[in-house]
Amino acid sequence: MTTAAPLSISPKDARAWLASGEAMLIDVREPDEFRFEHIAYAASLPLSRFGELFGALDLPAGRKLVFQCQKGKRGEQACVAAATLPGTPAAYNIEGGIEAWKAAGLPVVPGAGQGPSLFRQVQMIVGSLVLLFVVLGFAGYAWAFAVAGLFGAALAIAGLTGFCGLALVLARMPWNKP
């Protein structure tokens, strides 16, 4: 059994639909990404909580759903998930996500955060630590390879479980406060 490819829409067409009231925009990125910047019309519904929260949305009758993420992949996943739910209107994904929206010269609402998202901060920190300990390992400190492996394992576990202690710590840092 094959599933039809999600419907897609260009950023400019999506903006026209939103401005005319034809559609409702749902941003499926994580909350820290949404806080960093978002499209003015967007409601935040993280893909990680989609199944749990989608039913609680008050979907206006007769309006299309437009999903948007950073580059388009999570938006496609949201379209597929929405299509499986009964009574859901037609769902579209903005091609290229918010990146394509900005590239088309369309406005976004900047958030309070001036730095990278928590996800990117975790990547930069863990990547730097793995690199540091691998370099130390090649410099003759064999134990450093084990430490680099532990950081890699922690990152893999965070990806599998959705729990990242480093992200929780970073969320409490003053530069990440809204």
Image: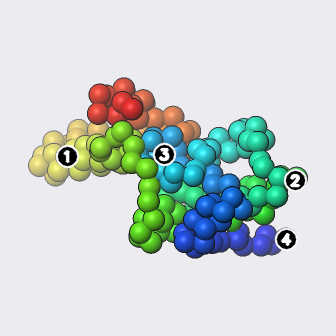
CA gap between label 2 and label 3 equals 27 Å
**Which amino acid does the dot numbered 1 rest on?**
Leu
CA gap between label 2 and label 4 equals 22 Å
| Residue occupied by mark 3 | 34
**Which amino acid does the dot numbered 2 rest on?**
Gly
Q: Earlier in the sequence, mark 1 or mark 3?
A: 3
Looking at the image, the residue that sits furthest to the front is 20
Which of the two discs, 4 and 1, sits closer to the camera?
4
Q: Earlier in the sequence, mark 3 or mark 4?
A: 4
Asked which quadrant contains residue 103, the reply is bottom left
Q: Earlier in the sequence, mark 1 or mark 2?
A: 2
Which of the two discs, 1 and 2, sits closer to the camera?
2
Instruction: Identify whether 21 is placed above or below 59.
Output: below
CA gap between label 4 and label 1 equals 48 Å
| Residue occupied by mark 1 | 132
Which of these two is toward me, 81 or 16? Answer: 16
Q: Are marks 2 and 4 in contact (CB under 8 Å)?
A: no
Q: Earlier in the sequence, mark 2 or mark 3?
A: 3
**Which amino acid does the dot numbered 4 rest on?**
Met
**Which amino acid does the dot numbered 3 rest on?**
Phe
